[in-house]
Image: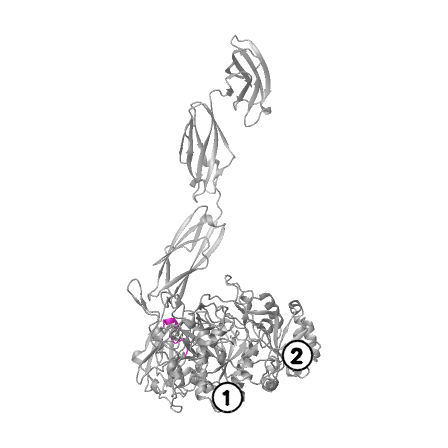
Amino acid sequence: MFSNSITYSFHVAQQLLAATAIIAFTACTDTITTTDLTRQTESHDVSIIPNRLNIKLKACVIQQIDNSRNTLSTPTGSDLLDKYLHDVGANKIERIFPFAGKDEHRQRAASLNTWYSMAMDSTKACGTRAATQHQLESIADYTEPAYHAVLENSEYIPGDDNSQTQASEDTYFNDPLYDKQWNLHNNGNIGNYTDATGKRIISSIAHADINAEAAWRQTTGDPSVVVAVVDGGIDIHHEDLQESIWINKNEIPDNGIDDDNNGYVDDVYGYNFTEDNALITPTRHATHVAGIIAARNNNAKGISSIAGGNGNPNTGVRLMCCQIFRNNPNYNPSDKHSSETIGTGDRNREAAAIVYGANNGAIISQNSWGYDLIMKQTPQVIKDAIHYFNTYAGGNKTDKALMQGGLVVFAAGNDATSAPSMPSAESSVVSVSSFNPDFSASWYTNYGSWTDISAPGGSKPVNGLYPLQDGQPTSAILSTVPATTAHPNGEYAYMQGTSMATPHVSAIAALIVSKYGNARFTAKQLRERLLTGVRPIDYNKYLTETYRNSMGSGYADALVALADYDHETTPTAPFFLVNQAKPDYGKIRMAWTSKNNGADGSLQKYVLYCSKNPITTANYTNKDVQVYNIPAQFAKENQAIQYTVTHLDNNTKYYFGILAEARNGHQSSLTVLPNSIATLNNTPPQITPDTESERITLAGNDTRDITLRIEDHENHKWTVAFSTVDKLRIVHTKSGVNIHIEAKQYMPGVYPVTVSARDELGAKSSYRFIIEVVADKIPSMKTQARKIRLRLGERRQIDLREITDDEDVNSVRYDLINNEDQGTDISIKDGRMNVVGSTWGQRQIHIKATDKHGQSGTMTFDVFVYRNEGIYSLFPTITSGMLYLKVGDTIDGHVKWQIRNVAGKLVKANAFDTSSLDADKRTYTMNVSSLTVGQYTLYITCQGKTYQEMFVKR
């Protein structure tokens, strides 16, 4: 989970459908303890194993079943359990912590034997949850879903071929790649260079390491000290690791018998919990972690390690393989959703792997894995396993008396967040963050008050820092990786991550036990030495504000961890430097000093207390009092220390108390600040609109621009947020925001908009306005088209407003679209159109009518200019056959017609009724093909009036 070098994506199994079934099933109980998964079901990132439930059976049920068997099929011996299993579609139940033979009595004492896991039918689990609720209450003390443990892809950059490399003459050990291990010994000369602008780029600072060489002068590790590596599989045949692998001396390999009666068969080097057998299958991640702890030192091969001995027999700690991840046979490096490793899956055995270490002699449990960051609590089964290791590791389980209890170490994670990562944030483990070779916090590391200590995790090239050199990383962590065909004895590679930082801490813990371990030494003493064994520097000087006082107790220093100190001293009480206190908006800078000295162990840290209520010696440990642990192992006597308490309310009084704590954990008396200190009063940004009305009414194509001026009287930076930005055009300026609104973007309706201005301290103000869009017609004619008939030369005025359909005709503007060569003279003024028929013929006039909201419609007029009011047209005037008569508007009803030649002789006559004509065309057709060639006159008579026109027959 917590290493990365080229790919840094987080891979988790997403099984929400089944998870929901489990949740629905367990959530209906209220008399047993269940995990609250309401929050987790809201995310697609929950790594729940589908259709699997972990259940802690009641003692009465345990008494009815054969608890020594790891798998029970129905009937189990308990009628209640059988009925429940049947109803949820499960046909068997499996122990999470396998029967442990000679160690079973300890597992029983810790109630680990009551933990079982079952695979359920999801449909039954949902459908029968009401019916099974009472049954579950009768058989279980605790239930929770099972989760996938996760491990990030461990892609790596291969290191140099160590067979072609020799150690420098001045290196501490003769391991050929030691010069590249800045994490052990940093001279401050790696990755530093001058860029193209002449600027000196510093990627490393001397002593940004764990001070390994000085520590090696005291111990390089004792083989009786065993570190359980709960991870993927270690390459147990690697040339630089094979002599450091723990061997179960009481187990005969490959005979299929549990010779040592520990519940596991043939577990000579540990156990593979992913396959449920003793065959350890190597993975990159675990092998890299193992090399950091205990690759063999001074063997003229590969790398050096922290606790890998000095090259002599019977030196160096031992590594126990507790494999919970294996290589994914379907891994696709080009698929970002594909994971290089997969966990125990349905076997659900991560907790068992931790317990295995305790039962078989490990006193330190090394864990560079975890769960999806969205999980806000550690599975109870893992908590129980950690508690078991802390309680039962060591003692008589080691080759010689070393320690009472054990220590569990977890990586903080690589999400670059202060959000607690589980299980690393548990107080029962040591949580490890990562720093770089220049003392800066690694860009990916998790951090916060929940982390305990920091160690080298390294970095790839980033932002011009930590460059490659000859294609090799200068600032990542070099360690062992599994053998390949090209390098059958093992390879070496660079990786980065809190996965790499964590084994540094586990290894230093192993050195501490190697030096101080005895029958009376306790895990509590180890934890104290480890977390106070940090480099005596103020690490905040190298950190950005984000990480200050958030990298645990400090940077791990093996020499300091091994150094003895006064176990009896009690520090003197510090006193506040009131004149250096400075209130601010949302924060208060405090200052103090004391007579204590970090160098002699009388000062390890200061504990600052802050409350809205007066602090006294009787209440300073109350839950409502905020506690700040401030590392001070670097401080000298009378050195002034300043610390800024942040995230405070504005304009609020706060009270403070402080005490000093020595390396031995002894604390001084509490010093209470006599008076309160108030934070400054912060007012929210002021929003001033350039309009008085908070309702903006628009229609049609209306637009409106609003300017909101934003001022912060304390000159704090501010940001603006909108309740909706849909369809608004927003321009941010230094002094506020400009908002452009277009009515055409909205359907008619009311649209409230809230604009919020928030300053950098969280003070917020709001301005609310309403966009009201009303329906608006596009201007149109009251009739589909209007006909205009004009005698040649006639002038006519038409009031366009009378024939316009609009909500406000008096506001409509009229524009002639075109009138080129139309044969009419047209002018428009004050909504009236003047038309003069200047040329005979038919044509159209187009007028654009635009209302006050900018919406436009077209008004079309059919204009006909005539010379003869009875005969609008007779065409063609020269014809050989057909003749078309278009009658005027005055012609209505019965019409008689005659055709006469130039001599006045009637040559053709007939009659028609206008009702038989097309109402629009009003055209009558005559066939004159029988006429002789010549000139003729057509006469039509209607209602006593006669009209005539000439034509030529050819």
Across the whole image, how many numbered discs are drawn on residues? 2
Residue with the most extreme left position: 198
Observer-nearest of 66 and 161:
161
* Residue on which disc 1 sits: 404
Residue 277 falls within the magenta-colored stretch: no
State which quadrant residue 210 falls in.
bottom left
Gap between marks 2 and 1 measured at Cα: 37 Å
Q: Is residue 583 left or right of residue 517?
A: left
**Image position, residue 49 (x, y; %):** 58, 70
* Residue on which disc 2 sits: 138
Q: Amino acid at mark 1?
A: Gln
Q: Which residues are magenta?
A: 543-552
Q: Amino acid at mark 2?
A: Ser
Nearer to us of marks 2 and 1 is 1
Above/below status of 839 relative to 278:
above
Q: Earlier in the sequence, mark 2 or mark 1?
A: 2
Q: Secondary structure at mark 2?
A: helix
